[in-house]
Amino acid sequence: MNRVLHRMRFILAGTILTLALGACATAPVSVEGKADIEKDAATTLAAAKAADPTLAPVFDTSAGYAVFPRVGKAAAGVGGAYGRGVLYEQGRAVGYCDLTQATVGMQLGGQVYSEIIAFETGKDVASFKEGGFRFAAQATAVALKSGAGANATYTDGVAVFTMDESGLMYEAAVGGQKFSYQAR
């Protein structure tokens, strides 16, 4: 059993490293890829607002927001997550972003979810663009459910919302995530 677990960790670590190296470019390379991620981000944003209409004022009054339509997370002792998204300012797409996360510890499994980060001030958006933004180890996200937007509060200049792809709501640990940005 120990040998099997060790082998699974090795395979998972190799897979995560391969995905991370293959996904090094923040912006999609092709015009079609850029159009696809922008369409996916718009669809995710619309689904979040439909799931919780109180989110619209949060996004309307924020300095900007990053939408990650699909964040894949997998672990077998060693884990990682990766997602590519779009950064919006004043409701307009201004660039592309990605998130990475590495974890070590007692963990097994995988999930796919959407993540939206609302920025409170222009300074918070600038920090994100400059690559100086990452979540503290204990950071968590608010699960999208009816009324979550009405109760949203900014912590260290951001409010984070998550939703799984099947529309079920849950909470997610986002601590340790780091981000990169590339202008459109």
Image (cartoon, helix red, strand yellow):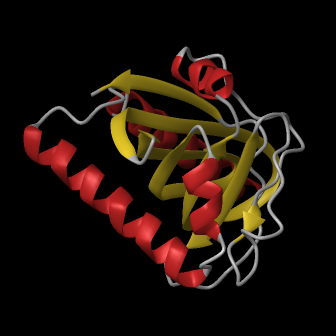
Q: Residue at left 82%, top 53%?
A: 140
> Is residue 85 or residue 111 the one in the foreground?
85
Residue 147, compared with residue 150, is above or below; it is below
> Is residue 135 or residue 106 the one in the foreground?
135
Residue furthest right in the image: 138
Give the quadrant of the C terminus: top left
Q: Residue at left 55%, top 48%?
A: 12
Q: Is residue 43 left or right of residue 76?
A: left
Q: Residue at left 66%, top 21%?
A: 123
Q: Residue at left 32%, top 32%?
A: 22
Q: Quadrant of residue 54?
A: bottom right
How far across and down, in percent of the image, does residue 125 sit?
59, 28
Q: Is residue 171 left or right of residue 71?
A: right
Q: Is residue 78 left or right of residue 10?
A: right
Tag count in the figure? Answer: 0
Q: Is residue 89 left or right of residue 128?
A: left
Residue 13, compared with residue 149, is above or below; it is above
Q: Can residue 106 be seen?
A: yes
Give the quadrant of the N terminus: bottom right
Q: Can residue 73 be seen?
A: no
How far across and down, in percent of the image, does residue 75 sit?
66, 55
How far across and down, in percent of the image, does residue 81 sit?
58, 47
